[in-house]
Amino acid sequence: MSTPDSTTAAAILPLVGGPANVLTVAHCMTRLRLGLRDPGLVDGPGLRALPAVLGLVADDGSYQIVLGPGTAARVTPAFEALLTNAPHGTEPVPTAGPAAPDATGPTTTSTTSTTADLLALRGAELRAARSRRNATPLKLFLRRIADVFVPLIPALIGCGVIAGLNGLLINLGVLRDLTPALTAIASGFMALIAVFVGHNTAKVFGGTPVLGGAVAAVVVYAGVAKVTVLGVTLAPGQGGVLGALAAALLGTYVEKWCRRWVPPTLDVLVTPTLTVLLTGLVTLYALMYAAGELSAAIGTAAAWLLSTTGALAGLVLGALFLPLVMLGLHQALIPIHTTLIEQQGYTVLLPVLAMAGAGQVGAALAVYVRLRHDTSLRTTIRSALPAGLLGVGEPLIYGVSLPLGRPFVTACAGGAAGGAFIGFFSMLGDHVGSTAIGPSGLALFPLLSGNRGLAVTAAIYAGGLLTGYVVGFAATYFFGLGGIRDNGLDGGLDSGLDGRSPARRAEQAAV
């Protein structure tokens, strides 16, 4: 029997070139991630027209279809089932019409494009430019680090919600016989997260995943308490996810070295042995100690930053997060979030950074109100706002604020205001944290934690969101739309985007 998710998967498949054009399939919390043989076969406008699709991102070999929390996890298996059942030997299916410059923009170059089409075209140009800028060794490395941690997010979210529920029950003094069981369920994954990090690191960097997990397991093994390094006895878990990441990276390089030099007849015996032995010794006598010091420094720095310069730190972090996302540098924060969760039970950085999404929502609402006669743009905003409220910002970023230019800046202003609000309360000793990474916006409420109780923590976070909404709206309404005319469906942005006519923008995008 057909389900909405299988129907969505069936609708997506021909629009990405058919089964023969799909090389790899994966998903994160909000996106279906496809590796495609020929991205030029993708029908971007056709995908955007699907009700379940919230946005598209082409990013250095990965074509990402934004479906939203939950939906991505349900559609992916249905999509994989279609690929499994597809006839073998088929050729990629060309989609109707020419592909956009980066396979995500509109296919038309008509001078009578609607405002939404023009913004989509401009968003496609910006995505292509960002992909070119991001093709640096550092950013590619950071993206691979993110690939290590992104698959762990569902477990972090599930355990985080259970931890929050358990804390609420403990504070209320009810169901006391159940809380030890909930503590075990919520804490079990975090106690062994190093093993999962090691497994994924080896997988991403080209090693054998189980060997990566084996060397990372050394970090959390209780027996390390009998090992002394520089006169200091190691503690189980010392170095945490950073130590596991470093151990698995080293193990991958040791394994690759062994594959090159060990005779094939001895490979099955010698390579795993040397990989685990050599990497394990280096992990015990160097990596755990160094990673432990680094992890402690991260925790101390985060606490000092928000407790001492909270309002200023929140303002800067909230303002810069959207540009960091555009540059791909936000991926460097994932191990930091995970380290803070491992150390303190929550990350104090994520609620501050989530304010950038609030500013984005406020800016989009201002555009919606000001350009009241532009039906196409208002339709785009209406369809993207629910996702934006839940922390999925790509549709609003690439479909509205970034192509318009100024609203992206005023959205950052809203994020700065919301971040400063939360940072101010951190200076007063009221810390707002998240027990997991991934969600933001309204979706972050079930994961909130802090040192002042759930009610106070939720109230501060809600105040930050409201501040971000209001400042993002006001800044965009009064300062973010200068020169952009509201002339209806076809004349809305003739010169407001960047001074070019629609024909000139289409001509340059096609080159």
Image: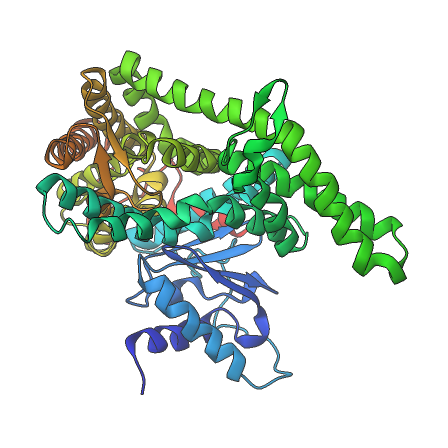
Please indicate, yes or no, whether residue 442 appears anywhere in the rendered image. Answer: no
Given residues 311 and 299, the one toward you in this image is 299
| Direction from residue 441 to residue 277 in the image, left or right | right
Given residues 100 and 429, the one toward you in this image is 429
User: Residue 93: x and y, percent?
Assistant: 55, 76
> In the picture, residue 476 is in which quadrant?
top left
| Direction from residue 256 to residue 424 in the image, left or right | left
Where 8 sits versus 230, above or below?
below
Give the residue at the far front of this rendering. 226
User: Residue 81: x and y, percent?
Assistant: 47, 78
Given residues 173 and 57, the one toward you in this image is 173
Question: Residue visible at 29% across and 12% down?
Answer: 308
Given residues 458 and 372, the one toward you in this image is 458
Give the residue at the far top of this rendering. 308
| Direction from residue 203 to residue 448 in the image, left or right | left
Question: Residue visible at 38% across and 35% down?
Answer: 498
User: Residue 112: x and y, percent?
Assistant: 33, 56
The image's colouring method is: rainbow
Please indicate, yes or no, whether residue 164 appears anywhere in the rendered image. Answer: yes
> In the picture, residue 414 is in which quadrant?
top left
